[in-house]
């Protein structure tokens, strides 16, 4: 039985992704309350694969997770996208006006802040996980407390949905990656890569790298910089590229390995549509 690790509990968005991808397989879902714990579980072989959110269409890149992948030499083997629809939920028999507090993950609270402008009496409280809040409300019978989570959490924990799709920006999509300790075998059908590199601190070095990618017919879909902690003022670049010809990617990789001070492949896999 394959063990799939998620950040959060059953009913969370990570759980929805795991169910969607592995519904046809014999799997066991293993819950972790933080991405650090999830990563540790993968490294210690408690799980075979980890589901990890990496980017949100509203909030942008989840930078600590990029750092976790890099620091622990983990590999991305798949990506998928999930439409995030936040629901306000509470124990049955309550209305929004009955709530004194609403608890959820900080990102969910931020994405739904505009909705609560109409309810200034409700205090917004940060929590570890969206679905975990829903679970605690059900287990502890906490009246006067609401949760922001997905519809799966409301159904799983028997809560009533008081308002649907309360996020400010309705088109709210999160990109998740499936992470393993070892990379996929390289085959010609792979068409997306996640790379990390650092460059000499001199004029035009990044432009030269981008020109190499263009010359090799790579399509740059994402670029993100993170400071190199050991060297103030220096940055590492995390990029996603797609390509039609695997041989062209291999050519670019061989050149970039020579050009960059440090170069790492975080994963080569098949791209998915949002």
Image: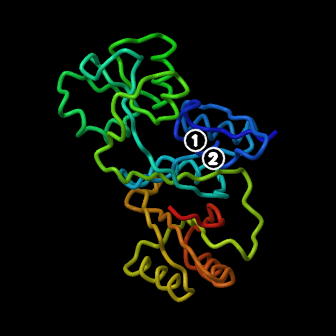
Q: Position of residue 17 (x, y in %)?
A: 59, 45
Which numbered dot is residue 16? 1
The quadrant where residue 40 appears = top right
The answer to whether marks 1 and 2 mark residues whose Cβ atoms lie closer than 8 Å is: yes
The residue positioned 63% from the left and 65% from the top of the image is 265
Coordinates of residue 61 in the picture (x, y in percent): 43, 54
Along the line of sight, the residue nearer the viewer: 214 or 95: 95
In this view, which residue lies farthest toward the right?
A: 1
Tag 2 residue: 20
Q: Classify residue 9 by image quadrant.
A: top right
Residue occupying the far bottom of the picture = 215
Tell me the number on the disc at residue 26. none
Q: Secondary structure at mark 2?
A: helix
Q: How many marks?
A: 2
Furthest residue to the front? Answer: 93
Q: In this picture, is 218 found above or below 184?
A: below
Residue 77 vertical position relative to residue 140 in the rendered view, above or below: below
Viewer-proximal residue, 110 or 73? 110
Q: Position of residue 171 (x, y in %)?
A: 37, 54
Residue at x-position 39% and y-position 81%: 204
Task: Describe the element under mark 1 as helix, strand or loop.
Answer: helix
**Residue 113: quadrant of the picture:** top left
- Give the side of residue 268 with respect to residue 60, left or right: right
- Callout 1: 10 Å neighbours few (<14), some, many (20+)? some
Q: Residue placed at 24% from the left, 20% from the top?
A: 97
> Residue drawn 47% across and 65% down?
237
Camera-nearest residue between 22 and 271: 22
Crowdedness of circle 2 by 10 Å Cα count: few (<14), some, many (20+)?
few
Q: Is residue 10 above or below residue 210?
A: above
Q: Is residue 271 rendered to the left or right of residue 28? A: left
């Amino acid at each position: 039985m394959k063990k799939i690790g998620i950040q959060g509990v059953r009913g969370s968005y990570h759980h929805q992704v795991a169910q969607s991808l592995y519904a046809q397989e014999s799997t066991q879902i293993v819950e972790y309350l933080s991405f650090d714990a999830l990563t540790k579980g993968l490294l210690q072989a408690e799980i075979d694969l980890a589901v990890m959110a990496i980017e949100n269409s509203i909030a942008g890149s989840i930078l600590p997770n990029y750092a976790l992948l890099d620091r622990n030499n983990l590999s991305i083997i798949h990506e998928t996208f999930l439409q995030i629809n936040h629901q306000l939920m509470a124990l049955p028999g309550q209305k929004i006006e009955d709530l004194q507090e609403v608890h959820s993950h900080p990102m969910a609270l931020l994405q739904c802040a505009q909705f609560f402008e109409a309810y200034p009496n409700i205090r917004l409280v940060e929590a570890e996980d969206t679905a975990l809040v829903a679970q605690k409300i059900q287990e502890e019978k906490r009246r006067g407390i609401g949760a922001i989570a997905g519809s799966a959490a409301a159904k799983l924990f028997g809560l009533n949905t008081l308002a649907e799709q309360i996020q400010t920006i309705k088109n709210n999509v999160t990109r998740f990656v499936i992470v393993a300790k070892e990379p996929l075998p390289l085959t010609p059908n792979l068409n997306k890569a996640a790379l990390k590199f650092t460059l000499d601190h001199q004029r035009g070095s990044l432009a030269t790298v981008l020109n190499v990618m263009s010359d090799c017919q790579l399509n740059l879909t994402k670029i993100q910089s993170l400071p190199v902690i050991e060297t103030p003022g220096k940055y590492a670049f995390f990029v996603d590229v797609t390509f039609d010809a695997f041989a062209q990617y291999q050519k670019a990789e061989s050149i970039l390995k020579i050009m960059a001070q440090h170069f790492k492949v975080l994963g080569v896999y098949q791209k998915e549509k949002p």
